């Protein structure tokens, strides 16, 4: 289920930052990035990759090990090797510790911005809306406009060098990174306001392009194409993003009715549903399921359409099919739990708690999941666990005073020395410290 979360930094002039959560797209990005992270000696589970809904080319690292990739980069890349090359370059910045070399004021500003990004995502998802949610965050700044993420030419060259080594080390061609840099270099003559932000934050020189061209010729994998499976995933990802984010006329220009490829059918199914023709969206999704009965993301799409059409009871079994195929997906588990809770049935409430537990094991700071857990505990009359869940949700959203108060309430109600009671104490102390820091 593709979810958009809009985050507006505190000052009025800043643009909104819109983050995307989608199980399929995030899985593809993880397949691209995990070998690179491992080759760089980094733990994949310690690096957070966020998708920014923005049609412009950009990707950046901030706040230590947080990587942000624009949807424009994903949609405009001709080949998965281009995205893999971009990720390799950003991984180079992480591995080289470039963020740590900046001055204290920039570090603190970046930390504030990233907090706004991440806390805002939790706050936005905590609204419970499965489509576009908004959250207003105070204290944030527009990273691109303020130039806090700008790298020096020396750092860029170092990241390129690391990227090439990572690509060669994972048996992949540096061609994608070179192709992407050539795409960006075509904008150098544009005025700054018209350039994609990648060019402004990643200084590009002809020396860098010559270096990559030379490394491509030297690489034993220079002529190695992308894995066909990754190519198929890339085309699906692009079709999904275009279906969700572009108007129907643009979707049909890219994927006309005569195009019966899987990506084209996928894009048209999504676009019809997004334009309000829910029935046509379901018909097209059903056609995909006839051809691909084991595809979890098609079941997820059908479930999302049914759920947003108000047909919650019909959506649940579709989410269950998706969850059965992908039992470890935290987002599908969360969507299933939400639908089960909407049924307002004690039996399905308990099933929902199990699915929420799956989500929270992998995403312990998922504010929306904790909010749903609070609803289930509240219906069951478990006031202590309700307060604890609300405390967790508030902490994930950055609302320290609320988290502190709910944790104190939970601690009074829950039995002493139980796991819930101990966790409430931890939250109370942490939230109190965070609240004091803000004052």
Image: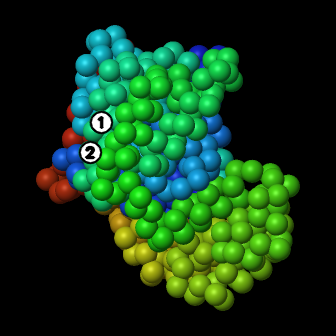
Could you say which is closer to the camera, residue 311 or residue 15? 15
Picture quadrant where residue 111 is located: top left
Name the quadrant of the N terminus. Answer: bottom right
Residue identifier under label 2 = 165
Q: Is residue 28 above or below residue 336?
A: above
Depicted 18 relative to depicted 172: above or below: above
Q: Is residue 410 above or below residue 331?
A: above
In space, the residues marked 2 and 1 are separated at their CA atoms by 6 Å
| Residue 109, percent from left and from top | 39, 17
Q: Residue at x 77, y 80 (%)?
A: 283
**Residue 297, horizontal then vertical, whole percent:** 56, 72
Residue placed under numbered mark 1 in the picture: 161
Mark 2 neighbour density, 10 Å: few (under 14) some (14–19) many (20 or more): many
Give the residue at x 40% y 61%. 224
Q: Residues within 10 Å of mark 1 (few under 14, many from 20)?
A: some
Residue found at x 47% / y 76%: 323
Q: Are marks 2 and 1 in contact (CB under 8 Å)?
A: yes
Side (left or right) of 235 relative to 431:
right
């Amino acid at each position: 289920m593709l979810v958009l979360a809009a985050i507006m930094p505190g000052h009025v002039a800043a643009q909104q930052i819109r983050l995307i959560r989608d199980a399929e797209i995030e899985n593809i990005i993880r397949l691209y990035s995990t070998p690179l992270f491992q080759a760089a000696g980094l733990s994949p589970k310690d690096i957070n990759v966020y998708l920014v809904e923005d049609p412009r080319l950009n990707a950046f690292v901030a706040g230590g090990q947080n990587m942000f990739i624009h949807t424009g980069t994903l949609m405009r890349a001709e080949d998965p090797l281009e995205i893999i090359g971009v990720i390799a370059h950003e991984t180079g910045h992480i591995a080289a510790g470039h963020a740590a070399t900046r001055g204290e004021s920039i570090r603190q500003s970046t930390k504030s911005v990233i907090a706004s990004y991440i806390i805002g995502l939790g706050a936005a998802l905590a609204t419970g809306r499965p489509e576009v949610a908004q959250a207003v965050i105070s204290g944030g700044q527009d990273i691109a406009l303020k130039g806090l993420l700008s790298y020096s030419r020396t750092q860029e060259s170092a990241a390129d060098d690391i990227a090439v080594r990572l690509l060669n080390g994972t048996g992949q061609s540096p061609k994608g990174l070179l192709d992407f840099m050539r795409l960006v270099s075509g904008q150098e003559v544009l005025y700054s306001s018209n350039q994609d932000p990648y060019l402004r934050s990643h200084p590009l020189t002809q020396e860098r392009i010559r270096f990559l061209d030379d490394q491509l010729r030297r690489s034993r994998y220079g002529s190695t194409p992308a894995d066909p499976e990754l190519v198929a995933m890339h085309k699906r990802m692009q079709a999904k993003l275009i279906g969700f984010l572009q108007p129907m006329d643009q979707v049909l220009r890219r994927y006309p009715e005569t195009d019966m490829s899987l990506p084209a059918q996928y894009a048209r199914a999504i676009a019809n549903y997004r334009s309000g023709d829910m029935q046509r969206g379901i018909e097209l999704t059903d056609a995909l399921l006839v051809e691909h009965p084991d595809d979890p993301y098609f079941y997820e799409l059908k479930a999302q359409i049914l759920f947003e059409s108000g047909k919650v009871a019909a959506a649940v079994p579709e989410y269950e099919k998706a969850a059965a195929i992908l039992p470890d997906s935290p987002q599908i588990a969360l969507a299933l739990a939400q639908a089960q809770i909407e049924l307002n049935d004690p039996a399905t409430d308990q099933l929902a708690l199990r699915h929420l537990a799956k989500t929270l094991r992998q995403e312990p700071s998922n504010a929306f999941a904790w909010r749903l857990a609070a609803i289930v505990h509240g219906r069951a009359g478990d006031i202590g666990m309700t307060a604890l869940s609300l405390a967790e949700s508030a902490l994930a959203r950055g609302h320290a005073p609320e988290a502190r108060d709910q944790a104190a309430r939970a601690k009074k109600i829950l039995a002493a020395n139980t796991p819930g009671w101990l966790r409430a104490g931890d939250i109370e102390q942490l939230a109190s410290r965070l609240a004091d820091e803000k004052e």
